[in-house]
Image: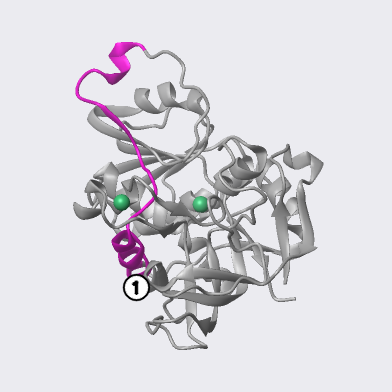
Amino acid sequence: MRACVLRAPAAIETNPLEFVDVPTPRPAPGEVLVRVTACGVCRTDLHVVEGELPPRKSPVIPGHQVVGVVEACGENARRFPTGARVGVAWLYRTDGVCSYCRSGAENLCDSPDFTGYTVDGGYAEYIVAPQDFIYALPEGFADEQAAPLLCAGIIGFRSLRLSAIQPGGRLGLYGFGAAAHVAIQVARHWKVDVYAATRDARHQRLALELGAAWAGGTLDSPPALLDAAILFAPAGEIVPAALKALRKGGTLVLGGIYVSRIPPLDYDLLYQERVIRSVANNTRQDGQDFLRVAAEIPIHTRVEIFPLRDANQALNALKNDAISGAAVLDCRL
Ligand SMILES: [Zn+2]
Ligand SMILES: [Zn+2]
C-alpha cells in the first residue's frame, strides 16, 4: 500500500514524510483492516512529525482521524461487517486493567496505544485497528467532513465538558483551528456566548461567521469576563492572558497534548478559585457522546482537502495558520 512514513522527526519545512510503498497490515484477532478514505490532519501530527512528542515508534505512519471502510476482519472480530463505514481515533487501545481503565478514566490508561504515534495511523491506504476502539459514524457526514470530528471534535467536546460551561455562559476559545471551529458549534447549540482570541485574521473571521460574540487577538482582553476558557493554541505564553480574562471561580482548560513553556504566573491571576486543568485524550464514551451530538446539531466542518501524497504540504499549511477549519487527506488513490 501507499503511505506517508516518518523515519525521523524533523522540521516540517524539510518535508520529512516520505510517500512510499509499505506492506499492507494484516488484522490480528479482534482487529479489523480498514481501507482508508479520508484522514484528518491534527496539530498533534505536527508535534509527532517535528518531535515535540518524543518518538515512540519509528518509522511511523501518522494520522489519527481516520475514516474508512472495513475491508477484512481478524479472528473473532464480528462487531462490524465488511463494508461498514468506521472511524479510528487517537485512543487506539488501552490495557483495560489499570486503575484508570477500571474506574472509567481510560483516557488516562497507564499503558495505552495512540493511533499514528505508538502504532501506525491513517496517512495510508489501509490501517488495522482493534474493533472495540473504533466508531460507527453517523450518516449525513461525507467521509472528509467526518474525519475532523474524530480528534478535533472529540477533544474539543471533552474540553467543553471539563470547562463546566453552562447555557448562557461566556466561553473563551484561544486559538481557532480545527478543534475550536467544531467546539464553537457545540457551544452555540448549548446557548453559550463564545469569545474567540486568535492571532490570524482569517481565523477571527471564521469565528464570527460561526457565531462568536467577539473575535480578537490572542492577548487582547475580551469585552466581558469569561466563565470558562479553552486554550487550543499550543502556546503557553497565552495562559496569563487567558487567566486574566476569567471571572472568579472560572476554569481554564488546556486542550492540547503539547504546550510551550508557561511563563511564571502572578498568584493574583489564579487566586479567587480560578482553575487551570489539562485535557488528556478521551474515553470511548466521549467519542460516542460527541458523535451523537454532532449528528443532532448537525455540525458542519469546514475542510481543506489535500491528496495523501501531499501530507507534508498540509502540515506546512497547518503550521502557518493557512488552514481555515480543518485539513483532511484524501487517501483514495
Ligand atoms: Zn489502563
Ligand atoms: Zn488530534
Residue 17 magenta-drawn? no
Q: Position of residue 301 (x, y in %)?
A: 52, 64
The C terminus, quarter of image: bottom right
* Residue situated in front as seen by the camera: 303 or 211: 303
What color scheme is it? one colour
Q: Position of residue 66 (x, y in %)?
A: 55, 66
- Side (left or right) of 83 relative to 108: right
Query: Vertically, is 266 above or below 276?
Result: above
- Side (left or right) of 129 relative to 10: left
- Side (left or right) of 4 relative to 32: right
Mark 1 = which residue?
296
Q: Secondary structure at mark 1?
A: helix
Q: Which residues are magenta?
A: 266-293
Residue 328, quarter of the rendered image? bottom right
- Seen at 48% across and 85% down, the residue is 84
The N terminus, quarter of image: bottom right
- Seen at 64% across and 56% down, the residue is 61
Residue density around tag 1, few if under 14, some if 14–19, many if 20 or more, within 10 Å: few
In the rendered structure, which amino acid carries the disc numbered 1? Glu
* Residue situated in front as seen by the camera: 282 or 277: 282
Residue 255, quarter of the rendered image? top left
Could you tell me if residue 327 is visible in this image?
Answer: yes
Residue 286 magenta-drawn? yes
* Residue situated in front as seen by the camera: 156 or 103: 103
Q: Position of residue 87 (x, y in %)?
A: 48, 70
Q: Position of residue 230 (x, y in %)?
A: 39, 40
Query: Vertically, is 264 above or below 213?
Result: above
